Amino acid sequence: MQTQSVDFGKGLAWYGGGWEIFKRNPGMWIVFMILLFVIAVILNLVPVLGSLLFALIMPGLFGGVLYSARELSEQREMDINHLFIAFKETGTRNSVLVLGAVMLGVNILFMLITLVLIGGGMGMAGMMGEGGHDMMTAGLGVGMLLALLLMSVIGLLLAMAFFYAVPLVMFAAAQPVAAMKSSFAACLANILPLLLFGVVYIVLAAIAVIPFGLGLLVLLPVTFGAVYASYRDVFPPAG
C-alpha cells in the first residue's frame, strides 16, 4: 500500500471533491445521513449493549458510505444497499468488525486510564485537604489536566490509525492491522494538509449547526466525499 505526500492546499481542495460527489445524488446522500442517525438512535436506546454494538459496526457503515462515494466519483449509481455492503462479503465483514472491536477496546481502555488519572487527582486532593481548599483544588486540577492531555494524545493517535484504515480494507483488501499501520504512516506523511482539513471542518460545522443542525445533512456527506477524495490522493490507484 504505497502512499504519497500531497500539498498543504489539498486539505481544502478535498472539500471541493466531496462537494462534486455530493452533487451527483444529493437526495440519496441525505437519506443516508438520516438512516445513519436513526440506526445510531435506535441502538443507543438499548442500555450498554446498544452503544457497544453501534461502535462495533460503525467502521462497516463508514465503509458503505465511502463505497457510495467511490461509485459516484466513477460515474456509477448510488444505492441504499451500499450502506451495508461492507457486511455482505465475509472477508470484508470480518475486517471491519475487527476494526470496530479494536476501536471499541482502545476506547474502553482509554476511559479506564482516564478514570484512574482523575481518581488519582482526587486522591491527591484528599491528601492535600489539610493544606486548605486551594491545595485540594490544585490536586484535582492536576489529575484532570493529565486526563485531558492523555485524551488528546490518544485521540489523535487513534484518529491517525483509523482515518484511512476503513477505505484500505474496503478498496485494497488490506488486513486490519496492516491497514491501521498504513493509515498512521499516511497521516504522519500528510499531517499538514490533514490539519487544514480538520480546521476547515470545524469552521464549516460551526456554520452548519446554526439552522437547527440541518446544515449537517449537507456537510456530513460532503465530508465523507472529501475523505474519499483524500484517500485517492494519498493512496493513488496502481498504474
Image (tube, grey):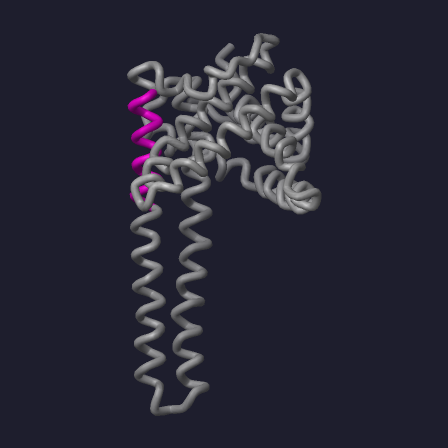
Front-most of residues 206 and 70: 206
187 relative to 31, above or below: below
Rendering coords of residue 149 (x, y %): 44, 60
Q: Main secondary structure of the magenta part?
A: helix
Is 238 contained in the magenta span?
Answer: no
Percent of width and height locating residue 2: 45, 23
Which residue is more in the foreground, 179 or 60?
60
Quadrant of the frame with the N terminus: top left
Q: In this view, does 114 lie above or below 214?
A: below
User: What count of labels does the image hold?
Assistant: 0
Q: Which residue is drawn at 41% across and 90% down?
A: 132
Front in this rendered view, residue 64 or 229: 64
Residue drawn at point x = 45 percent, y = 86 percent: 134
Where on the picture, by quarter, is residue 173? top left
Residue 13 visible at all: yes
Q: Quadrant of residue 135?
A: bottom left
Residue 182's place in the image compared with 149, above or below, is above
Question: For the view shown, which residue lies furthest in the top direction?
Answer: 76
Give the residue at x 65% y 37%: 214
The answer to which of 150 and 130 lies nearer the viewer is 130
Question: Residue drawn 34% across and 39% down?
Answer: 50
Q: Give the range drawn in magenta.
A: 93-106
- Residue 177 at what x, y percent from top left? 32, 31
Q: Does residue 211 appear left or right of residue 90 in this picture?
A: right
Is residue 4 rendered to the left or right of residue 54? right
- Left/right placement of residue 61 relative to residue 69 reads left
Q: Can residue 8 be seen in this view?
A: no
Residue 147: give x, y in percent of width and height: 40, 62
